[in-house]
Amino acid sequence: MNVLNVDLGERSYPIIIGCSLHKSASYLAPYIKGDQVLVVSNETVAPLYLKNLLENIDIPVLNTLVLPDGEQYKTIDTLNTIFDALLTYRHDRSTTLIALGGGVVGDITGFAAACYQRGVNFIQIPTTLLAQVDSSVGGKTAVNHALGKNMIGAFHQPQCVLIDIATLQSLPEREYRAGLAEVIKYGLITDVGFFVWLEENISRLVARESGAVQYAVEHSCRLKAHVVSQDERESGLRAILNLGHTFGHAIETHEGYGEWLHGEAVAVGMCMAADLSKRLGWISDADRERVFSLVARAGLPTAPPEIATEQFLGLMAVDKKALGGQVRLVLLQSLGKAIISADYSDKLLTAALSAT
């Protein structure tokens, strides 16, 4: 077991990484506040891990809620089912919510915790690769709107993040590969050495070799914790974590939530960002090809679905990084160095949208 720390002063918390951790109450007990717990999971994860988790939580009031599985259920209506459960079981402001599942469960449970009685405690137990390396860390919680992804939400940090590497063995292949997109992202935005390691070890990651997987998860979490510790509320540096996301969210919104997995859309978005960065003269043709090659070797798409350019631009405009009507993009000054920039021409952006 390894423990990393997200350093946010009084809101600091640990990321605990190991195997079969959800089977031991000793890891959770220090972070459960009060004597009420609501565990929120989904219909895919609950049959696999909920029973073991419940057997290891010794709390007077222990309730569960199992949500339908899928990005299409990350809505205000589903959020209200969590509030319904909390109110039905008479949970007070000392309650702790536990999110057991992937990014959708984590985001929506965290948002419920941020809102219920103006904020209660919650714990993240992510069971997908994407959630383990990205969405469970950093306190960004949200639901989707028909016009834009993650546009309704709050910053609300968990008490702890408990990452059980063993849960990745039950993850479907498509879901697992989608998570690799966020792993690749860290190498591109802030650590070229990690990017090189990924180039050398991507086949081991695709095969889910335990040593490679644990290293990739730990290193990704360490990099994200470092960025979040410097910029908790995304006022500057933290926005680099959104490499590929402006393009990717547009794809998800256009295609319908759940049709493209988030990681698949982000993978394409990173390729589009690399292509635009090359057109700006910031990275070389060879570096652009390295990005495309690594994404493809991870079994992820490199080209978007067919979307009319004007429609693509309109969808991108509904983005949390937009200021004054200007879409700011995360682009690459070099491999391992990302910046947030609006310093691109409409002509070059249109060319990048069309080329990939």
Image (spheres, grey):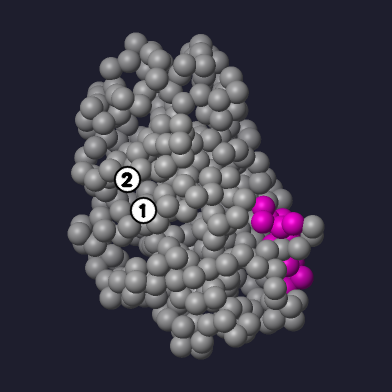
Of callouts 2 and 1, the N-terminal one? 2
The magenta segment: 309-323
Residue beneath label 2, please? Answer: 4
Task: State the image quarter where residue 172 is shown.
Answer: bottom left
The amino acid type found where label 2 is placed reads Leu
Q: Is residue 273 above or below residue 172?
A: below
Q: Which residue reaches farthest bottom?
A: 285
> Residue 127, position in %: x, y?
35, 44
Decide which of 298, 211 is in the foreground and name it: 211
Residue displayed at 30% across by 28% down: 28
Residue displayed at 62% across by 50% down: 235
Residue displayed at 38% across by 13% down: 35
> Residue 217, position in %: x, y?
32, 55
> Residue 9, position in %: x, y?
45, 36
Quadrant placement of the N terminus: top left
Q: Which residue reaches farthest right?
A: 324
Residue beneath label 1, please? Answer: 222
Q: Element under label 1?
A: helix
- Asked whether residue 43 is in view, the answer is no
Pointer 2 and pointer 1: residues touching (CB < 8 Å)?
Answer: yes
Q: Is residue 199 above or below residue 180?
A: below
Q: Element under label 2?
A: strand
Numbered marks: total: 2
Task: State the image quarter where residue 38 is shown.
Answer: top left
> Residue 354, position in %: x, y?
66, 80
Decide which of 26, 281 is in the foreground and name it: 281
Report if residue 161 lies within the magenta region. no
Report if residue 316 lies within the magenta region. yes
Task: State the image quarter where residue 321 is shown.
Answer: bottom right
The amino acid type found where label 1 is placed reads Arg
Decide which of 345, 311 is in the foreground and name it: 345
Quadrant placement of the C terminus: bottom right
